[in-house]
Image: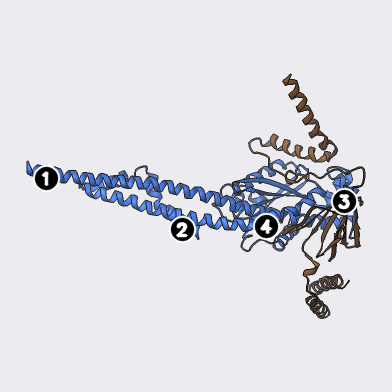
Amino acid sequence: MAMAALRREGRRFATPLISPNPATVFRSSIIPSEEPVLSGVRCISTQVVRNRMKSVKNIQKITKAMKMVAASKLRAIQTRAENSRGLWQPFTALLGDTPSIDVKKNVIVTISADKGLCGGINSTSVKISRVMHKLNSGPDKENKYVVLGEKAKAQLVRDSKKDIELVMTELQKNPLNYTQVSVMADDILKNVEFDALRIVYNKFQSVVSFLPTVSTVLSPEVVEREAESGGKLGDLDLYEIEGAETKGEVLQNLTEFQFSCMMYNAVLENATSEQGARMSAMDSSSRNAGDMLDRLTLTYNRTRQASITTELIEIISGASALEG
Amino acid sequence: MFRHGSRSLSRASTMRWRRPFSTDLPAEATKDSNFVEAWRKSIPAVEPPSTPSVFMATRPTTPSSIPSKLTINFVLPYSSELSGKEVDMVIIPATTGQMGVLPGHVATIAELKPGILSVHEGNDVSKYFVSGGFAYVHANSFADIIAVEAVPLDRIDPNLVQKGLTDFAQKLNTASTDVEKAEAQIGVDVHSALNAALTG
């Protein structure tokens, strides 16, 4: 809602913004009437500046409000993201971190926000996803996208529509929780065939810095193959496995659980980054609006003063002409 | 003179750095550099992204003698209950039965069932009821326990447990579809485990 208002405001004052000097635009439009009404021009030029000042002030109010909203949301979600950071570490300790693994079916899970006005985090996710796609492409390889969030969808649909397997949006309608994320992860696991899932998200570091990150989750078959061949997961063969009857079954459960845990952390980190980025973006735009307002106020006062001085001169010279 | 000093210093520092890498997890270091190299080769304009291992504290290697304490990480989606805590023993509710883990336990991956996780530290025993998850015991006397939900045992109301148990038992009897039956069965399992935990 706030964004729509912002856009409206933007449109209203966009026209005078484009031309460097709004007064000249106005004058040129008034010339065809062929009446040298200078006083009128002066009046209306201050009117134009006043209107712009009003709209800039409104924009500043909106961006300030958005910043406040982002700041309060950030505080809530930041603690949750930080608390969830323990969750994925055991999996990485056990199954390792395998971004360079070479498999046939790659699925790139791009996590982005549903809303814009949050700096470059969405385009960063998309850019990294595209590079991952390029990096893993080959003659007999398959790359698919699973897209979370409206913004990444809008960007990826443009050039790789055929590769998008699944799109999920409005993730953050309700506050994120593990149940919701695991249902979503289950959805992805059911609908997409994969050898390796690569989750691309922005890890929150501080309000102004986000680290694009790629987490890799392998399918149980790949895990088993790698463990047996003594490749990257050779250590896994040393572990005794307790639980279900077969090793494959346990690995299946394990990788599914790993995916849901990784996703949970990734989604939270990305949401935190989004709020942080929005906060800093809105902060800088309210500062910009403030600067612009200062400049406009100066122009306005100067014009007003000039017109007063001109009028005074007219009066005084008129009076002196009568006297003389 | 100073130049030599700096050289020996840098050598000492590289030695110190190299050692943990060569003994720790040799695969780990090469793996990442492969990825970064491949990335830089194909797309030099974009910085390679981070990977989870960058954010993780490195785990120590398997010591030659068994340490006296077990280091456990007990994590839930919404918090890290215990992180890097040194304890004497944990008893894990694995699907194959209760599993006591002492320092020097053989490396194991265990699935958890609803039951009590007890953490023994000297004379203190803290008990949690966990709903299920996974536990990994590493060869270096580290244990990671991941549960979807866990509560300290003293925060469970016995009356509600009894009520839930009878409710779900009733539902199990009246269930008609497979889904309902499975749901009721899960309810009965969890509540009877809770009941056993509270009375036992």
Q: Distance between the residues labelled 3 and 2?
A: 61 Å
Camera-side residue: A313 or A212? A313
Is residue A218 visible in the rendered structure shown here? no
Q: Mark 2 lies on which chain?
A: A
Dot 4 surroundings within 10 Å: few (below 14), some, or many (20 or more)?
Answer: many
- Chain displayed in blue: A
Is residue B109 visible in the rendered structure shown here? yes
Name the N-terminal-most of marks 4 and 2: 2
Give the side of residue B77 with respect to residue A232, left or right. left
Q: Residue B43, position in %: x, y?
A: 66, 37
Q: Residue A217, position in %: x, y?
A: 76, 50
Q: Chain B is drawn in which colour?
A: brown
Which mark is drawn over residue A80? 4
Camera-side residue: B15 or A243? B15
Q: What element carries label 4?
A: helix
> Which residue is disc 3 drawn over?
B69
Q: How far apart are marks 2 and 1 (CA)?
A: 52 Å
Q: Residue B55, position in %: x, y?
A: 72, 45
Q: Distance between the residues labelled 3 and 1?
A: 102 Å
Nearer the camera: disc 4 or disc 2: 4
Q: What residue type is labelled 2?
A: Ala
Q: Mark 1 lies on which chain?
A: A
Q: What element carries label 3?
A: loop
Q: Which amino acid does label 4 sit on?
A: Arg
Name the N-terminal-most of marks 4 and 1: 4
Q: Which chain carries label 3?
A: B
Which mark is drawn over residue B129? none
